[in-house]
Amino acid sequence: MLNGKNGPHTPENAAERQTQLLSTLDWFSKWKILHDENVVKGDASEFNFFADETWFCIRALILAHVGTIQIYCIEKRVCINPRCMNTDAVEWFFGDARQFVGGSTNKMSAKGMGQAATKADACSNGRHAVHGNNKTAHDAMVRRNKW
């Protein structure tokens, strides 16, 4: 459903696709609740479920698709092909932000992420005019002497 195997999301099938996605999320959530109960009882270890980061990403992916279907298919009445959707821009943003805080965003505060995002954004804006090996603008990252 998320990979486009069932065809594009359309205004006609949008509600059905959202229902399928939310029922998938409900299935994962019930599994997580059952897992947590079994861990408390001692019948399972904490490693019998996804890592916290993976579980967060699964929920985010499903909810992002539900929101995308809502905005584009239901409200704007257009078709979207899930095979054409990717997360490259978001991944690049967080990759740049991670570089500015020493490579790790584990247990980062909102203020720290905001500062890293500001630095990453400034760096990205400074690099946008440089294309490949051929510079078309001065390098914004080089220190200039005032004299």
Image (tube, rainbow, N blue to C red):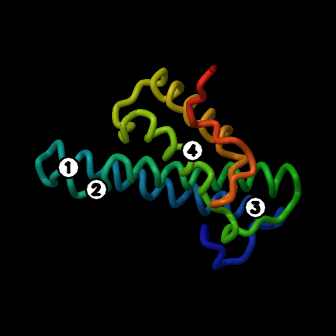
Distance of label 3 from label 1 (alpha carbons): 36 Å
Q: Is residue 119 above or below residue 21?
A: above
Residue occupying the point 40% across, 51% down: 55
Of 60 and 14, which appears nearest the observer? 60
**Left or right of 20 on screen, residue 74:** right
| Residue linked to disc 3 | 14
Which comes before the other along the chain, label 4 or label 3? 3
The answer to whether marks 3 and 2 mark residues whose Cβ atoms lie closer than 8 Å is: no
Whether pointer 2 and pointer 1 mark residues with C-beta atoms closer than 8 Å, the reply is yes
The reply to whether discs 3 and 1 touch (Cβ–Cβ < 8 Å) is no
Q: Position of residue 99 (x, y in %)?
A: 44, 41
Q: Position of residue 102 (x, y in %)?
A: 36, 36
- Dot in front, 4 or 2: 4
Displayed quadrant of residue 147: top right
- The numbered mark, 3 or 2, whose residue comes first in the sequence reads 3
Crowdedness near tag 3: few (<14), some (14–19) or many (≥20) residues, C-alpha within 10 Å: many
Question: Quick one: SS at disc 1?
Answer: helix
Residue located beneath label 2 in the image: 49
Front residue (pair 87, 140)? 140
Disc assigned to residue 46: 1
Q: Amino acid at mark 2?
A: Phe
* Left or right relative to 37: residue 5: right
Residue 23 falls left or right of residue 135: left
Viewer-side label of 3, 1: 1
Q: Earlier in the sequence, mark 4 or mark 1?
A: 1
Residue 93's label in the rendered image is 4
User: Residue sitting at 60 percent across and 56 percent down?
Assistant: 87
